[in-house]
Image: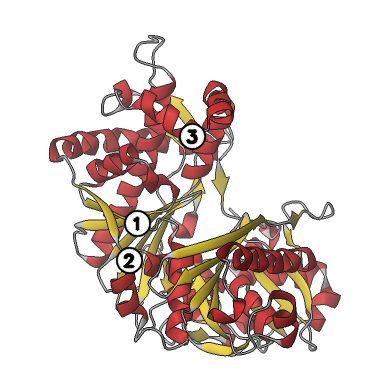
Amino acid sequence: MENYLLAIDAGTGSIRAVIFDLKGNQISVGQREWIHKEDSRFPGSMDFDIENNYNLLILCIKEAIAAAKIEPEKIIAVASDSMREAIILYDSEGKEIWACANVDSRSVDEVSQLAKISEGIEKEIYEESGQTFSLGALARILWVKNNMPEVYEQTTAVTMLNDWVNYKLSGNLSVEPSNGCTTGMFDLASRAWKPEIAAKCGLKADIYPVVHESGTPVGKITEEISSITGLSRECLVVTGGGDAQIGSVGVGAVKKGQAALFGGSFWQLEYNVGTPKVDPEGRVRINCHVVSNQWQHEMIAFFPGLVMRWFRDGFCQLEKMIEKDYGIDAYSLTEKLALDVPIGSHGMLCSFSSVMDYSNWKHAAPCFTNFGIDPEKFHKGTFYRALMENAALVTLGHLKIINALNDIEIKEIVFASGASKSSLWCQIVSDVLGVKILVPKVKEAAALGTAICAGYGAGVYKSIEEAAGELVEIEATYTPDMENHKKYGEIYETWLKVNKSQMENSDKGFLNHMWKAPGL
C-alpha cells in the first residue's frame, strides 16, 4: 500500500494543504486565501482570524484529499510551515485569546519603549537572539500588555503560526526553533527559549511551551480532526518550521556553506552556517535552520514580487486582457518586451529596496530615474527589466555582506519561488551576482521541505539532509557571463549612490520611505 505525506503551508496571504508521495512528487493541493482583519481602533493592526482560518485549514485538507483521490488513511504524517513573526497567545485552558499576522505593525510605540529601557539593550538582545525589535514578538506582546491588559494577564503561552496548526491537529502545544527563534526571545546557541530576555523587557518569563526540533512527532491526529477530514487517528503530527528555513530544505540547501535565494513577495537570501555568529555591525538577521546543527545568515529585500504585481496591475492592462481571453500569462508577455532590452536598461535605474541593515532597517522612497522620452528605448519592457535588475542589485549588496562576514566567496546559489520561473530573471541574477544559479524542479519549496520533515518524523527518511539530497532535483542551471557581471558591478556602484540620495531625501521628509521598521 502506497503511503503519503501532508504538508500544511501557511503563508502570509493564503494557506495550502499539499499531498506528496514518498518520492517527493506533489499529488494534489487545496488552497484558500487567509482572512486578516484590521482592528479600526488600532492603526497598523492585522489580526489573525482564528475561527475562520481554522475552517479554511480544514477545508484545504479535505480538498487536497479529494483531489488526490486517495484514501485519507494512507496519509501517515503531517507537518506545517508558516510565515514567520505571526504569533498566537493562549490562556490556561489552551484557548486562543489573541493572534496577529506577520504584517501587523501596530507596535511602533512599543519598539521605542523597549529601546529606552537601557542604552544598548537592542544590541544586547541581538547578540543573544540574532533578532532586533522590528519584527520580533517582544514589541507585540508589550503592545498587548499596554493596550489589552486583561488579555495579557490571561496569557499563559505563546506560539508561532505553524505551531498553532500542529496544535489544532494534535491537541499538543509546542514550538520548534526555526520559527520560534524569530520571536527574539530565543538563545541562538542553545536553540531554546531564554526567558531572561522577556524579563529584561518587562514581560512574562513563564509563557514559553516546550521546544522540539523540526521533524519531531508531537502527537497524532485528534478524534475531532479525524472525524472531519478522514485522516487516520494514527497519522503523526510532526514539527515543521518557518517558511524560509524549511524552504531551504525544499531546495536542498541543507549543508553548511550552501546558499538559497527565494524570489517571492520578499526576496530572502539564506546562507547556512555551523555556528550562530552575529554581525558586529548588526546588518544581518540570524535564525535557527530547520536542520538541527545549523543556523542561517539571512538578508531580506523588500517587495520585489509585490512590485512586479503592482507594475502588472498598473501598467499592463493589455497583457492582463490577453491573459483573461487566451490564458497566456501577463508576466510572460511583459517579459518578452524586456528580452531585447540591453544590460543596464539603457542607463535607467530604479530603486525599490535598500540593502538591508537589520539594526537600522528602512527603505528609501521608490523611484525610476535616468530614463528618456525615446519610446524605442524606454518602453514597458525597459521598465520591467529595470525592476528585475533592481531586485538582483539589492541581492548583490546582500551577497557582499554575507561574503565579508563569513570571509568566503559564495560560488553558487539555489534560486526558488515565483521569480525563478523566469529564465530572463534567473540569468540577470546570475550575471549580477557573478555566481552559478541552480533552479530546482519544485520551485514552491516550503511545502516540499515540510513534507520532508513529516516523512523524517514518521521514519520514512533517515535524516532531513539525506531526504533533501534524494528528493530535490535541479531543473536548470544558469552560468554568469563575467563580462556582464563586470558591467553590473559598475552599475551597482551608481545604484548605491542613487539609493543613498533617495534615502537622504526620505529621511528629511521630502519623500516617503517605502518602508521602515517600527520605532525608527
Could you say which disc has been placed on residue 329 in the image? 3
Image height of 263 relative to 466, above or below: above
Q: Amino acid at mark 3?
A: Asp
x then y, percent, for residue 204: 69, 84
- Asked if residue 278 can be seen in this view, the reply is no
The Cα atoms of the two marked residues, 1 and 3, are separated by 20 Å
The percent position of residue 506, horizontal first and vertical second, equals 53, 37
Q: Is residue 72 left or right of residue 419?
A: right
How many numbered circles are shown? 3
- The residue carrying pointer 3 sits among few (fewer than 14), some (14 to 19) or many (20 or more) residues within 10 Å by Cα, namely some
**Residue 49 is at least partly visible in this image:** yes
- The answer for how far apart the CA atoms under marks 3 and 2 are is 27 Å
Kind of element beneath mark 3: loop
x, y (%) of residue 183? 57, 73
Mark 2 is surrounded, within 10 Å at the Cα level, by few (under 14), some (14 to 19) or many (20 or more) other residues, namely many
* Looking at the image, residue 452 lies above or below residue 498: below
Q: CA distance from mark 1 to mark 2?
A: 7 Å
Q: Which residue is mark 1?
A: 441
Q: Nearer the viewer, residue 258 or 336?
A: 336
Q: What element does badge 2 sit on? A: loop
Q: Earlier in the sequence, mark 3 or mark 2?
A: 3
Q: Is residue 252 above or below residue 197?
A: above
Q: What residue do we see at 56% from left, 61% from top?
A: 29
Query: Is 480 on the left-hand or right-hand side of 349?
Result: left
61 vs 396, nearest the viewer: 61
Amino acid type assigned to the residue bearing label 1 in the image:
Lys
According to the picture, the residue beneath numbered tag 2 turns out to be 472
